[in-house]
């Protein structure tokens, strides 16, 4: 589990044979979970200047290779003794979004990000979302996407300051929104699939 608060940015040394090697000041242990641009990965090797993680098939099917290039966000898994900030982040990417527009305000930047229509059901106004591993609040949801307000501190301390229109970002929607949507959809499927005989049997059991 993660909180969406970035520990540091690291440089990608190489990405070969499903192994991603990073140059980092952070020193994990073999087997540790660590989020790379919001993707939960496992540390498989340590180096003098950093560490390596392994990228599984499922991750490669969802996350484009350019999200494991250049500079990346890293966050180690939280410990029970840690102060809980941000929101609950699993490190499981739901989809890839595209930055459509960036508007500079007086003391913040408005980011407009498009996502596949099926993802919008899990994105809630004033709810939480993780973008490349960064815990943020959704300010508006509209047809085809959503809007975020990024404060100067976040622009300076994360990769948001380097993002431009057309850039792709990893998106993990809110855990609770996904769970509720799944439960409701499952209940609807159950209602549709029950026969009259089954309904009678359920009624007689009370």
Image: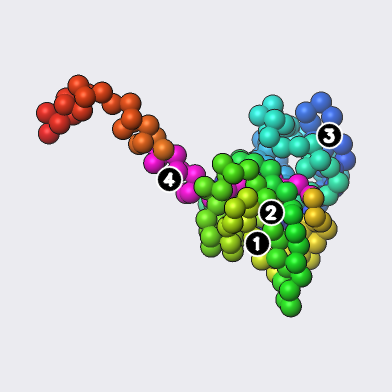
Q: Residue at x 20, y 21 (%)?
A: 197
Front label number (3 vs 1): 1
| Distance of label 4 from label 1 (alpha carbons) | 23 Å
In the rendered image, the vertical position of residue 147 relative to residue 15, given as above or below: below
**Looking at the picture, how far across and down is residue 56, in whole percent?**
69, 29
Disc 2 target residue: 113
- Which residue is depicted at the point 70% across and 40% down? 29
Helix, strand or loop at label 3? It is strand
* Residue at the disc numbered 3: 15
Gap between marks 4 and 2, in whole Å?
23 Å
User: What residue range appears in magenta?
Assistant: 167-184
Contact (Cβ within 8 Å) of mark 4 with mark 3: no
| Residue behind mark 1 | 148
Q: Earlier in the sequence, mark 4 or mark 1?
A: 1
Foreground of the two, 26 or 187: 187
Left or right of 156 in this view: 119: left
Could you tell me how far apart the alpha carbons at marks 2 and 1 are, in whole angstroms?
A: 8 Å
User: Residue 144 placed where, x, y %?
Assistant: 63, 50
């Amino acid at each position: 589990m993660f909180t969406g608060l970035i520990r540091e940015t690291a440089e990608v040394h190489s990405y070969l044979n499903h192994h991603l090697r990073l140059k980092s000041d952070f020193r994990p242990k073999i087997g540790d979970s660590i989020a790379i641009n919001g993707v939960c990965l496992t540390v498989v090797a340590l180096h003098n200047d950093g560490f390596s993680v392994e990228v599984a098939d499922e991750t490669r099917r969802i996350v484009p290779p350019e999200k494991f290039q250049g500079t990346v966000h890293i966050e180690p898994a939280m410990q029970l003794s840690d102060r809980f900030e941000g929101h609950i982040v699993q490190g499981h990417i739901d989809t890839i979004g595209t930055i459509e527009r960036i508007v500079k305000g007086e003391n913040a930047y408005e980011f407009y990000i498009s996502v596949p229509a099926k993802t919008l059901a899990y994105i809630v106004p004033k709810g939480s979302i993780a973008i490349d591993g960064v815990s943020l609040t959704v300010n508006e949801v509209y047809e085809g996407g959503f809007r975020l307000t990024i404060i100067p501190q976040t622009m300076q301390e994360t990769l948001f300051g380097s993002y431009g229109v057309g850039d792709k970002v990893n998106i993990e929607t809110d855990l609770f929104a996904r769970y509720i949507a799944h439960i409701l959809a499952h209940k609807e499927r159950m209602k549709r699939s029950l026969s009259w005989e089954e309904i009678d049997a359920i009624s007689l059991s009370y």
